[in-house]
Image: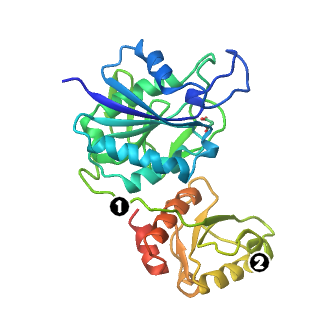
Amino acid sequence: MTTKLTVLATGGTIAGIAGSAIAHDYRAGEIGIEEYLERVGGLGLEAELSGTQIANIDSADIGPAVWHPLHAAALAALNDEDCHGVIVTHGTDTLEETAFLLDLTLPATKPVVVVGAMRPADAVGYDGLRNFANAVRVASDAQAAGRGVLVVMGDRVFAARDVYKVRTRGTEAFRGFPRESVGLVTPASLEWFGAPWRSGTEAAFGWPETLPEVVIVYAHAGLDGAGVARQVAEGTRGVVLAGVGEGNMPENARQELVRLAARGVPVVRASRADEGLVDREPEDDANGFVAARALNPQKARILLQLLLAGGTSDPAAIQRAFDGR
Ligand code: SIN
């Protein structure tokens, strides 16, 4: 049986063009999905690919306006009995946020793989073809289905919850935390580390009509209450602190965040450190804070937005949701 995969294209460097094989500057999101599929047609991939252009932009500009049609198209593909898996092509800069959002809002019934590239398509050493061939290998594998949304970069397979971008250059730009990677892939082989963990499960969240405004406050030496207040505009529904160390903050900043929490604006403590596990501390109860656990600030923001959109604003209920991730 031929494996049929749906490719949903959003742009990024994987579809980028520099106009020269050695130039540093380039434009992300230039090659359309039809042309891209023609280019990969010569690789001899063992799958039938059909493409849809959702957007063709730099992923710095990805947000609800693109997430909405992307989610709808991915869900439609998962419900189509003629489709065996979904590949999303995406810029690498915000790839982890889109992957995590889809992971929380799609059922784990078929493989969903997000893939990008660090070098534009006409650059010497373009990594996009290999990453795409690897993504086809993963999306064609029945065992990928029970692992939620996966990210394929640099011959490794990451879970959406774990993956984050660690480098601005070079093809080994992604890492996973707390699980490093969940598999190794080449265009010819795929090796999983362990069994699927969410086979057949429904989406954790329904797709929200809107995503409430949640800001990330970046902690630094010298941050004070006024510095926090300047970043939290009227109408902000939630705050994620990119805290120092294990989600910590200067005392004056803490007092302002306690005031916000007391006014019913949930405050989630994450860490600005790379591998920033933030556990609950005894003072969190008194402060009204939530601990982000292993989620980095940008992923904690996505989870908090979904919780608020679903009507969950009580810190204890928010904490339970973070504990369950
Ligand atoms: C982008 O995120 O769209 C540009 C950078 C990249 O894809 O690597």
Residue 314 at what x, y percent from top left?
Answer: 47, 81
**Label 2 crowd bin: few (<14), some (14–19), many (20+), radius 10 Å:** some
State the residue at coordinates (29%, 51%): 197
Residue situated in front as seen by the camera: 91 or 70 = 70
Q: How is the image coloured?
A: rainbow
Residue 58 at what x, y percent from top left?
Answer: 62, 38
Residue situated in front as seen by the camera: 80 or 18 = 80
Residue situated in front as seen by the camera: 64 or 274 = 64
Q: Give above or below for 139 relative to 317.
A: above
Q: Is residue 32 left or right of residue 111?
A: right
Residue situated in front as seen by the camera: 228 or 219 = 228
Q: Give above or below for 34 relative to 92.
A: above
* Quadrant where the image shows the C terminus: bottom left
- Can residue 244 be seen from the camera position used here? no
Query: Residue tagged by mark 1?
Result: 204
State the residue at coordinates (35%, 25%): 49
State the residue at coordinates (49%, 77%): 313
Circle nearer the N terminus (1, 2): 1
Residue 44 at what x, y percent from top left?
Answer: 36, 14
Quadrant of the rendered structure where residue 258 is? bottom right
Q: Is residue 158 left or right of residue 125?
A: left
State the residue at coordinates (68%, 21%): 18
| Ligand 1 closer than 8 Å to label 2 CB | no
Amino acid type at image mark 1 = Ala
Q: Are marks 1 and 2 in contact (CB under 8 Å)?
A: no
* Image depth: mark 1 or mark 2 in front: 1
How far apart are labels 1 and 2 at the CA level? 35 Å
Query: Residue tagged by mark 2?
Result: 225
Residue 4 at what x, y percent from top left?
Answer: 28, 28
Amino acid type at image mark 2 = Gly
